[in-house]
Amino acid sequence: MRSLVLAAVAVGFAAPLRAADPPTHQIPYRLTDTKHVLVRAKLNGQGPFNFILDTGAPAVFVPKVVAKKIGLKVDGKGWGSFDQFELEGGVTVPKTRCRVEDLFQLEGMNGMGLAGVELHGVIGANVLARFKITYDFTADKLTFVTLDYNPPDPKGLGGKGGQGGLEVIGPVMKMMAGFMGIKPNFTVAPVGFLGIDADAKKGGVFVTKVFPDGPADKAGIKVGDKLDTVRSNSLDELRDLTRELAKTTAGQRIKVEIVRDGKTQTLNVKLGGGL
């Protein structure tokens, strides 16, 4: 009997412990006219600002005008640090180092209005390497899964001429835009934010999560509701929902038709803009 008890205890200790699932966030994004992936961020609680994701950049980059606007302290080598770097969708990275520098790529695109929206910075490896990121361009969000990894501080960007002399291109493109009569159009509003997660199942598109105090929550949409139509267009697949929301802007009111307990209801939803 004693041996059986010891064996049971041994088996109990040998059973593997299941690790808790790492935090996962759904980050709203859009593609710019230049096909860059754009997300929005708050810097030390200020913003939002428009950032593009660049896995080839070693760090977060912000131009000098943004650093001045938020009162960021910059050292003699052109580095600053955010107490909090927050992406729309819930990702927060404390104590994030950033490079304060006027990148010619951003100056050029902003000067000629190429992206269709004003760009305020670049998110590089010292933030992106902390997450496993899933890109699905048929959806309206990127999936960020937190990794147990702290990337090393970026190095080798100190001093002048860090862009190899290419920094002169940005001002030149601005000047060319003036000569050509090009006026950047930055009036593009953020895509409307409904405030739900949804999934396509047999029979249609169903709500799987409603964000508290979001537009859907305020309009009365609940988990389990079937999204029948959005903007009077029927939904058969998840991409139908994404396509309809891509045509909206923050603050716009749209009609959403849901089916709950076999009954159809039409709700008037005022879309948000995130952050």
Image: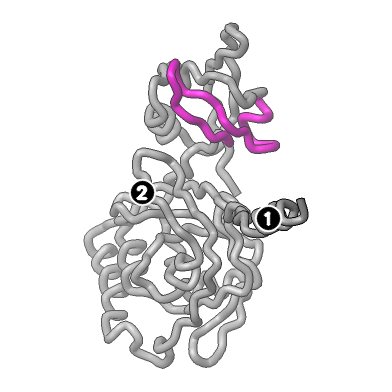
- Expressed as whole percent of the image width and height from the top left, the position of residue 274 reads 57, 45
**Residue at 50% across, 82% down:** 153
Tell me, for residue 7, which label it has, or none. Answer: 1
**Disc 1 element:** helix
Q: In the picture shown, does residue 100 fall above or below 130?
A: below
SS state under label 2: strand
Residue 92 seen: yes
Are the residues flagged by discs 1 and 2 in contact, CB closer than 8 Å?
no
Range of magenta residues: 195-219
Identify which residue is drawn at 42% across, 45% down: 188
- Residue, x 31% and y 74% (percent of image)? 171
Amino acid type at image mark 2 = Leu
The residue nearer to you, when weighing 184 against 136, is: 136
In the picture, measured across the screen, residue 156 lies left or right of residue 274, that is left
Is-magenta flag for residue 77? no
- Separation (CA) of disc 1 from disc 2: 59 Å
